Image (spheres, coloured by chain):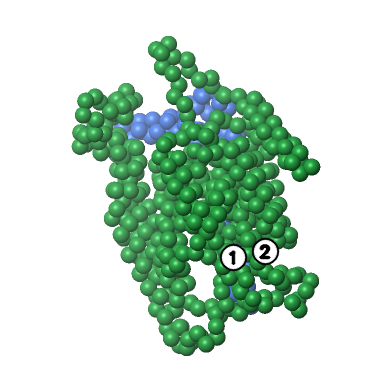
Amino acid sequence: MNRRKFITTIGRGTILSGLAAISGILIFRNSKEKDLCTYDFVCKECQRLKSCTQPEAIILKRKKAKNSVSNG
Amino acid sequence: MKKSLSIIFLLIIFSIQIYNVIAIQRFPKPEFESGHTQPPTLTPSPRAQALDILDVFVLAAALSIVSWLVIKKRSRKGVFWMSVFAVLYFGIFREGCVCSVGSLQNVTLALFNPEYSIPLTVIAFFILPLVYTLFFGRTFCAGVCPLGTLQDIFALRPMSIKSWLEKVLGVIPFIYLGLAVLYAATGTDFIVCRYDPFVGFFRFEGTFMMFIIGGLLLLIGVFIARPYCRFLCPYGALLNLVSRFSRKHITITPAECINCKLCEDSCPFEAINKPVVLKDKEEKPIASRRFIFISVIIPLLVLIGGFTASQFHENLAIVNPKVRLAKELINNTNYGEPNEEAFEITAFKSAGQSKEELYKEAAEITNQFYIGGWILGGFLGLVFGFTLLSLSVFRYREDYTPNKGTCISCARCVDYCPVLPEDRSL
């Protein structure tokens, strides 16, 4: 294997790993989100609220954070 | 026989439309009693999940067939008919959405904003062409991308352009790519989709400007082949980089090149590397010194680029609707409307958000643009640096070879080569 071929192989491997990592991250995030919410829009008592990324959960978490700041 | 086969083929394609009935809207459209009518949308209606999966299979199959046609069969005719199929299926039938070109923005947004849920189809449309390019060159551009194939059909009288101009204009896709990533990462806009010049033709509807720009590009494309792909396409810029590392790539000659020069002017995209005569060879110490000098100034170009772009962060951020709204409220300019309150301001007031909250949000977004400006400028500095480096390096070639970066594997050149695979002595 000459120098040019070696660099190409390394580059190809790096790009392929990068693409695999991007797909992995995105697929993992999607699957995680699906498991999280039962879509009954009751977040207050939810055990998974901390890691939930649904819009309702985000609004509630923001409100909670605001309240905790104003309460000192 | 051929005619009836093509009719059956088209019937199968269009009958798949029936599956659209499976797509059910989650929430029905609201009915107003005020006489308000729903405005027509410029985006396609939701598709059934089965169709989404079918699209991914069709994409993979089309990529495989084109790669086989290019690498193994070396058939320009086959690639042309796959181009026609791509325009019909990915363009007209799928209404040009989601396309791989636009999907890079969805992927960027999903990476920078975990709240955004990206469909698996979109991930596949982004990843699959890149993977195929990594193994077989830009076969996606050759016969699968509806934007490229539409232009390819119009490339009737291609002319050659100066190589320096080709190099200079070739930087534009990287600028467009950087801007598209910046705007998608900040959740501002999908500029590639907004300014897609051909989507109007695929949907048979669109703004007047969309048709004018698309029509102009097609007209230019008659003489300068694939102008959008070569001088604008941001996904093409990515594929250009990835293709340089491809495992296999189309070759002009199936065997040893006999330097007959027949293929010299066959490429409408100026993507053939010509042999370099040995007498042109310059002294090694001079070439090495120049190489080292440019390599040293590349980090400097990155810094200068980053600094310059970061100084324009406010100009770049103004495209963001929240930043624009905040600016309009601060300056009390009402979006230039002299008579009545702009609907953006009315909507903001009725939403109940305080001005302070909006200003804070706008400041955060502007700050993101400042950081993004550094990254964008640095990236562009890197592109300029590597372009300079590539211009300064002379590679000595004995054969006519395709340029792995800019060659879109259309297979036009193979028809010009008289060398037969079996007959090496020719």
Q: Secondary structure at mark 1?
A: loop
Q: Are marks 2 and 1 on the same chain?
A: yes
- Chain A colour in the picture: blue
Q: Secondary structure at mark 2?
A: helix
Chain letter for the green colouring in the rendering: B
The front one of B291 and B354 is B291
User: As drawn, which residue projects farthest toward the top?
Assistant: B33
In the rendering, at what x and y percent does residue B195 appear? 43, 44
- Output the chain of dot 1: B
Residue contact at pointers 2 and 1, CB within 8 angstroms: yes
Residue B405 sits above or below residue B128 on the image: below
- Residue ID for mark 1: B266
Amino acid at dot 2: Asp
- Residue ID for mark 2: B415
Count the labels in the image: 2
Q: Looking at the image, tell me whether mark 2 or mark 1 is earlier in sequence order.
A: 1
